[in-house]
Image: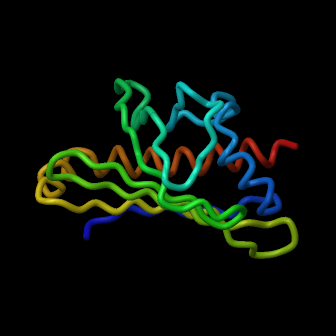
Amino acid sequence: MPSLYTEIEINAPRAAVWDALVRKRDWLYWNTYLYDRSPERPFRQGETVKLWLKRESRETETEIEPLITLVQPDVSLQWVYTAPGFRCQHGFELQEVGRNRTRYTHRVRFSGALSSVFLPFIRREEQRGLRRMAQELKRYLEKY
């Protein structure tokens, strides 16, 4: 199964990283990869949310409506979205690696008959988007 991955250590407690990740109304201050037009709706396991993804700054936004498959506070957030012949799973994991230090990991897994068709066109941009989001989260949390 094709996948993408990024990881970064953030000088902040795991609870603070989690709070920034799930507090969608504040994404506009730091997150240029994901957008939420209904930020007041929290992530709830078993529910869907409407998100917009912007892999590159010059790109138009791509609307997705993922199903939240796991909400484990301070540890993991996962969702999946599907289109005919295409499935994409996002997983965010937080691991405490020291006093007030957190390892943030973002994985994306692709599957389905059309994933081999779409992935060559979006792989590089998607990977850059994941890295950009991780770096923006780090800057946002470490500025305090």
| Quadrant of the rendering where the N terminus is positioned | bottom left
For this rendering, which residue is in front, 139 or 90? Answer: 90
Task: Decide if residue 142 is on the left or right side of residue 76.
Answer: right
Where is residue 109 drawn, in percent x and y?
34, 63
Residue located 61% across and 31% down the image:
39
For this rendering, which residue is in front, 105 or 80? Answer: 80
Where is residue 78 drawn, in percent x and y?
50, 59
Residue located 12% across and 51% down the image:
117
Task: Decide if residue 16 is on the left or right side of residue 6.
Answer: right
Task: Decide if residue 130 is on the left or right side of residue 136.
Answer: left
Residue located 45% across and 34% down the image:
50
Where is residue 134 drawn, in percent x and y?
59, 51
For this rendering, which residue is in front, 67 or 6? Answer: 67
Which quadrant of the structure image shows residue 93? bottom right
Task: Decide if residue 123 is on the left or right side of residue 97.
Answer: left
**Colour logic:** rainbow
Rendered view: 59 above or below 105: above
Residue located 64% across and 28% down the image:
28
For this rendering, which residue is in front, 105 or 63? Answer: 63
Q: Residue furthest bottom?
A: 97
Where is residue 6 drawn, in percent x and y?
50, 61
